[in-house]
Amino acid sequence: MLEMDVRTQKLEHQRQLMEQKMKQKRLTSGMIQISDIHNDSAKTRSNSVSQRELHGYDGPLQYLMSRDNNPDHVISILPSSGSMDEDDESSPVASTPNDNGNVPINPAVDKPSFIHQVSGQALETEGDIEGNVEKFVLEPAQLKVLYKCRITRDRKGMDRGFYPTYYLHLEKDYGKKVFLLAARKRKKSATSNYLISTDPTDLSRGGESFVGKLRSNLLGTQFTVFDNGVSPRKSNLKEGILPRQELASVIYDTNVLGFKGPRKMTVIIPGMADERRVTIYPQDESEGLIESWKAKNMDSIIELHNKTPVWNDDTQSYVLNFHGRVTQASVKNFQIVHDSDADYVVMQFGRVAEDVFTMDYRYPLCSLQAFAIALSSFDSKLACE
């Protein structure tokens, strides 16, 4: 018992030392921050609404923590030198101010095949859950519907300091949120491997609520998203058990020259037919999304990329217009688009507080695909930074 107490004290001491080093790194001079809002009227409106953001440890965590241990802690959404992760030194992407607030971007008439030529004049509505959560998180988004979500990251405690838990909520009116998914990296895995569940209290591979996983290669530059099916390599497939389906892949360009710039992402997803996702059950790696993309076999897949940020001389940072949904600079901030139409943002993700991020997605993505793509951005990528 004494040995366990000593070991626990050592781990806690190591964690405190790491936190001190991270804080010192964050306070280093020259850290790029979000651009200031130059429009006085926009600043006045922003201040009149609210300058504080709920930390986000509500929703599923209310079942895991008592109210005394988890009070409604609030965090300022105003940029500060300590608001960025240790890997956010690499030219973080800020959000450009916009007077239109949260005005959605609608697709114009001539769009790629998966958008089905949606009229640009039609108003976009905010999405809601239809049916049970297990089915909803796998269904592609409806056309002309924007799903606004929020991801909270729980890093409290020695264990979660290294293996945080991530919670995805669908945002509702008046600050309400509906829990959708939770994820956590597996501890004993050769590569980064995140289990994703619809139950915030059960993140096990054998749990009934297990819906998918995100797995990386050794370098952490390529990620593949699977559903809860069984690997085809396992010969003990029982009758009625489906093999696993590939839902998405994310490829980060390696940074061999050491250039301090924003990340470059390629997202590959199955194609769409009559607004339904094409099922891809690869029997081996050569039939997967990444290998098909490398072989330029694009018959049943869709290739997306992150929108290239623009360098702003005034703020000395790379900027993207997130229409008010992102408030802090971070190398993790991104928007996913199709090359044929950079104005139709399929997905966007960005920081609003130290452990709170917004994640919005549209057709043809589903909640699980978008959440897994966002999770890939949290993972460290030594070959990319």
Image: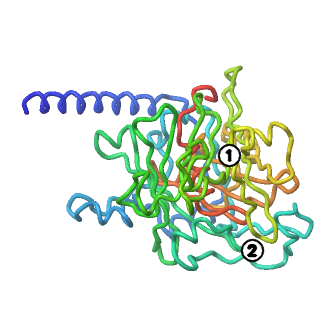
SS class, disc 2:
loop
* Kind of residue at disc 1: Ser
| Residues at discs 2 and 1 in contact (Cβ within 8 Å) | no
Comparing marks 2 and 1, which lies closer to the viewer? 1
Give the residue furthest to the right: 110
Colouring of the image: rainbow
* Image-quadrant location for residue 136: bottom right
Rendering coords of residue 171 (x, y %): 52, 70
SS class, disc 1:
strand
| Quarter containing the C terminus | top right
Rendering coords of residue 110 (x, y %): 92, 66
Residue 19 placement, left or right of 37: left
Checking the image for residue 144, the label placed there is 2
Relative height, residue 239 to residue 81 (above, below): below
Rendering coords of residue 234 (x, y %): 55, 44
> 276 or 287: nearer the eye?
287
* Kind of residue at disc 2: Lys
Residue 289 placement, left or right of 169: right
Rendering coords of residue 288 (x, y %): 72, 44
Lower position in the chain sequence, tag 2 or tag 1: 2
Label 1, on which residue? 249
Label 1: few (<14), some (14–19) or many (≥20) C-alpha neighbours in 10 Å: many
> 26 or 196: nearer the eye?
196
